[in-house]
Amino acid sequence: MNKTLRALVFGGTPLSSLAAEAAFTALRVFAGLSMSLAHGLGKLPPGEQFVGFVGKLGFPAPTLFAWAAALSEFLGGILLAIGLFTRPAAFFVLFTMGVAALKVHAADPYLKKEMAFLYGVIALAFTLAGAGRLSIDCLIRKGK
């Protein structure tokens, strides 16, 4: 893998202290596992009801988009938690949470949108910053 692609996929900005890294890692692991187990697992495999719901949102190929949403939440959450392919996984979670907040819950009060926005902002942070030093991505980046 060339250096630029490696930096894009596995890159990130290292945090300055071990305590900050530990906190960042705790957030990554907790948010990833919560996303995966509380929100993604129940959507796999996407059932007729979920596929129909995705179709009513106006997405073409609702089965494909239902799988994409379910895998973004489940697999994206697992990858985020273990710190592997963190930036791409977080990007897909961010996109899915954007759809949840701005499309699915568009007419709902903020209280219903809050969870999607919260996961979205967490995903944005990991999309931009990467997983940190305490991650599989960091081991790969260093070539170990």
Image (cartoon, rainbow, N blue to C red):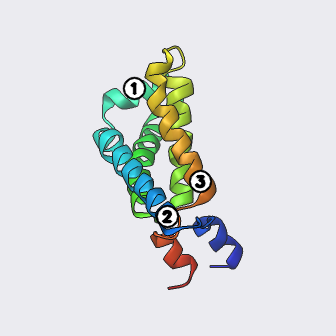
Going by the numbered disc 3, the residue's amino acid type is Thr
Q: Residue tagged by mark 3?
A: 127
Residue 114 on image: x %, y %: 48, 27
Q: Earlier in the sequence, mark 1 or mark 2?
A: 2
* Helix, strand or loop status at disc 1: helix
Which of the two marks, 1 or 3, is nearer to us in this view? 3
Q: Residue tagged by mark 2?
A: 21
Q: Is residue 133 above or below residue 28?
A: below
- Outermost residue toward the right? 4
Label 1 neighbourhood size at 10 Å, few (<14), some (14-19), many (20+)?
A: some
Residue 37 on image: x %, y %: 30, 46
Residue 27 or residue 45, whichever sits in front: 27
Quadrant location of the N terminus?
bottom right
Q: Is residue 54 above or below residue 86?
A: above
Residue at image point 40% right, 56% down: 26
Residue at image point 59% right, 67% down: 16
The answer to whether the residues at label 1 and label 2 have Cβ atoms under 8 Å apart is no
CA gap, disc 1 and disc 2 = 42 Å
Q: Residue tagged by mark 1?
A: 52
Residue 70 or residue 132, whichever sits in front: 132
Dividing the picture into quadrants, the one containing residue 46 is top left
Residue 17 or residue 72, whichever sits in front: 17
Q: Is residue 96 above or below residue 109?
A: below
CA gap, disc 3 and disc 2 = 16 Å
Horizontal side of 43 relative to 71 (left or right) equals: left
Going by the numbered disc 2, the residue's amino acid type is Glu
